[in-house]
Image (cartoon, grey):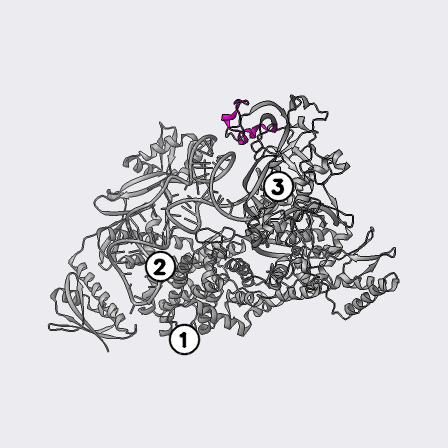
Amino acid sequence: MYKEYKQLNLSQTGKDVLDFWKKHNIFEKSISSRPANNPYTFYEGPPSANGMPGIHHVMARAIKDIFCRYKTLKGYQVKRKGGWDTHGLPIELAVEKSLGITKDDIGKKISVKDYNDACRKEVMRYTDIWNDLTEKMGYWVDLENPYITYKNEYIETLWWILKEFYNKDLLYKGYTVQPYSPKSGTGLSSHELNQPGTYKIVRDTSITAQFHLKTDQQHPLMSLLFEDKNEDTVILAWTTTPWTLPSNCALAVGEKIDYVKIRTFNPYTYEPVSVVLAKDLVAKYFKAEGENASFQDYKAGDKIIPWELRGSFKGVELLGLRYHQLMPYVTNEDLEKNAFRVIPADFVTTEDGTGIVHTASIFGADDFRACKENGVPSVMVKDESGKEVPLVNKQGRFVDEVTDFAGLYVKEEYYTKEEREAPGFKATDVLISIKLKTENKAFDVKKYEHSYPHSWRTDEPILYYPLDSWFIRTTAVKDKLVALNKTINWKPESTGTGRFGNWLENLVDWNLSRSRYWGTPLPIWREENGPEEKCIGSIQELKDLLTAAVNSGRLSQKEQEKDKTILQSLNNSDFDLHRPYIDEVVLVSSSGKPMYREPDLIDVWFDSGAMPYAQWHFPFENKEQFKNAYPADFIAEGVDQTRGWFFTLHAIAVMLSVTSEEVKKVNKEVGNKGVAFKNVVSNGLVLDKNGNKMSKRLGNAADPFETIEKYSADAARWYMISNAAPWDNLKFNEEGLDEVRRKFFGTLYNTYTFFVLYANIDKFKYSEPEVAIEKRPEIDQWIISLLNTLSKEVDAFYADFEPTKAARAIQDFVDAHLSNWYVRLSRRRFWKSDDSEDKLSAYQTLYTCLVTIAKLMSPIAPFFADRLYIDLNKVTKKEQFESVHLAYFPEYHTSLVNKKLEQRMQLAQDISSLVLSLRKKVGINVRQPLSKILLPILDKSFKHQVEQVKDLILSETNIKGIEYITDTTGFIKKKVKPNFKVLGAKVGKDMKAVAEAITNFTQEDIAKLETDGEIPVLDTRYLILSTDVEIIAEDVPGWQVANLGKLTVALDVTITSQLKQEGNSRELINRIQGLRKSNGYEVTDKINVRLSNHSHIREAVTDNLSYICAEILAESILFENELNEGELATIDGIEILIAISKI
RNA sequence: GGAAAUAUAGCUCAAUGGUUAGAGUAGCACCCUUAUACGGUGUCGGUUAAAGGUUCAAGUCCUUUUAUUUCCA
């Protein structure tokens, strides 16, 4: 017996199937049952388990899962090692929050050891929830043996890679201005700045400052700038970061930009002043009414400030002009000599501000570069150890030398909420503005809205800040990165060529350093103030150098003891490579000086980008496993990973392919040019139904667990995949989920239920020999043909990473063809057919369809597909697989595909549809039989085609017969349409005229074209062939006619009394079937029927007695004059009582 | 400021440069059904974001603009 269900409960199905998988280790078997020498490699991008998963994870992981399952069906062994990203700032911040400490407290209030222990715990905090989601959504990934980035083995591989780079001079220490987060005390990599939500619109205080020009300088423009001795001429420069003004060291202009000098008054001090700014921006600062207004009449505070244009010049003419330092807290000889002057820069625009850029070299990457190029020194102070440091310290506060603002945070956001709300609180930017206004140094102060980068986790604005850092010289392999990227198949392509490709073209070196505690330590040891350094590439190397250090006799007693303990611990394999332990390792340089570890950690993105090697602890062990799983055939992540994981994977792989002999060897063996992955799907975002970003704060985020519980994982996956291509953003709408559940799964479930209902009655177990395809009826051959076509299409779509197209094709087949045509038209064969072979054929055909669909859909809807497959296969035992996921992808058989058949079935569907539409138009319902339809014949094959599907049309539309008419009958009106594609090539520019001529053809012209096969147009300039046009029968005058494309159908609407009787019989059958149903009779129950005695109905019944009895399984139909029980029904306007009883 | 994607019916999506831009869904009306879940037929709904251009022919190709989203500066 096939399993029968009361109703469809996808959610429950999911749970049941999940239990089954677990109990029978189906996932393990799906790998072990495939040959190891036929691998398909997938890399799992490690999630960080310190946050809750969201619905977008379901989307991303569904995509990963689909292709892995598909490749398994295709016979590949698809190992997928899970992984956890365990290092990094998010974890540290979570720990700091839960412990109630800040970064400064580490090493003081809490030891680094305790802190890192806390991180180690924090890191796996949500592991259980993640694992739960992974299971519930049906994502198959190896959770038993995941790679974990904090393990010593993992770190050792990272060290090995770094050493490979180091040896080839691809790892170096440098000094740059970088995005820096004072709160977390660390620089941010470009990958981190790339996190969603980094750039935010903020309102900052912007100042247009007056840089007073020195009067005692030699410069060609002096006479123009200072027309009289008392004139006060200033250069206006604009900034949105007033806190950088004390560090100003230069002003940058665009050499080709036009500038002007304008005489006016300062709006705050009302003192006369002459200002220099870009010509294009004059209107931003000066009102038209003020132009050339009287200077004499101006009184302090007047709204209209008079101004006049006094001169104009190019930017290049301004170069070299010297000005007084704006906020002279810190200066020295070098600065006085080389700073505070006008320099050129290519990044200056006239979009905003004044067209002159205030430049503080140490607080802007562009500024830094421009100053360096022009030999302008930076404004720096010396700290207690004599090291040069900026005017803003690492906490984001002004140093003591900036007396007025010493100790103040430069950004308002760095204060606590309480501090900011305290009475009298003023942001530092505002304080600076006030000071400048009073000192006659501000020309304009206002709030300015712009987008500014924020730290992706602390949510506070970053600073651009000068930092020491270790870099990977990615620019050295730029050409190779670009070239190899072109060999990668990106879905969608534009992400690879555009977003990723353009970025590679403009690559900068990868800033690797992080000044934190929980992460992979940089394995570099350096002398305190000397040039010697050592990069460690393995634990063994560390041991060797430790041994050498211990034996060198150059270390202090304490250091030596420490090293000894560490060495012992390393030998016992119980040493943790993290800080603080690793920091205690002191090595000895070749000249005999102690070397200490560089305190930096490395970027966590390096951790994840190195997973192809580190997950196997390559090259220290598992060389064979690595070789079998390198490079990845397929990876998938969100598009936001383009410059994250996708980049780090690519960069490390390409660099290793040129630096590492080990990797070169493997590449050669597996035929890899040096990439980490061959195919990559970058999926879009999941938005809410209105297209807004989902966020917990706004409360519009869909919870993945609730969604799965309510709609099931299958429905969620199917919905996400079928609705939009993976790389398009998905507007997540619950109504869509419901629709998928109802329409697709509902229809499929019903088809199964229908099959089972009769298969159980007839004990169909597919034990009979296969009915040869050519012996099966048309309709069976047809659906089998379509099924094969579908298998081929779906196969191609999956292979091309187009899951959406696959899902849509399957859905269309199930809904439009299988359920609503095949089953609908074949129903009677299952329960009425006397011909046992016909019935068998029907069963076998429908069974094949269902099993095939189960396989085709299984990558996307793994639970339901498996239930369907198992329920069917359990009874028939046709296949030996215990799960659809262990089966193989349906094979495509060309011999089973019959395009002609598919076409004529389409014809049958179209004709039926037209007839039904005609019936609707004239108001004759389908239960009323009609005598015939007329079909105009346009070509010979048409009639032949229709004849073969005639019975289907007739039964579907309840018509008695089809008559074919040719135009010789004389009354078909024809229409001719130009075939533009063919004609376009032929007539080109005359298309319009030719098309018009053709449309104007008379019936005679058309007839001539049909008989002769050609007709001249446009004064015989062109000869129109019958292949250049399409001739259709448009109308049959006097008949009810409907058209669809070339097809025309005319309906005979006369109802003879006999037809009427038959119609009434059908009405009666319909009422009685309804009663059977409402009485709850089984479909096999026989009944007796009693009816009110009405002559009209009795006549109808008598004429069609055997037909009626057969339809309703009645043994007898009796007419009773005095019937007073049963249901009242109205047939053809006559009220009768119907009473039925089960025998 | 730069790069990329998207823009078609109320909504979700189609449409190798070639007929009158189609489906589904939602709404309305009618119908069918021994699958009770669907389904059918009709109806309603479009300046294909805007403006130019190329072409015999543009939703489709090109240019510009606008909006949304993402990434970078």
Residue A757: % across, % down: 36, 71
Disc 2 is placed on an element classified as helix
User: What is the CA distance from the residue labelled 1 to the residue labelled 3?
Assistant: 85 Å
Give the amino acid type for the residue marked by disc 2 in the picture: Trp
Give the amino acid type for the residue marked by disc 1 in the picture: Met
Residue B34: % across, % down: 30, 67
The residue that mark 1 highlights is A1
Q: What is the quadrant of residue A772 in the picture?
A: bottom left
* Residue A225 at least partly seen: yes
The residue that mark 3 highlights is A432
Disc 3 is placed on an element classified as helix
Viewer-nearest residue: A1021 or A554: A554
The answer to whether marks 2 and 1 sit on the same chain is yes
Query: Within the magenta stretch, is there residue A290?
Result: yes
Give the amino acid type for the residue marked by disc 3 in the picture: Ile
The residue that mark 2 highlights is A821
| Disc 1 versus disc 3: nearer the observer | 3
Q: Which residues are magenta?
A: A274-294
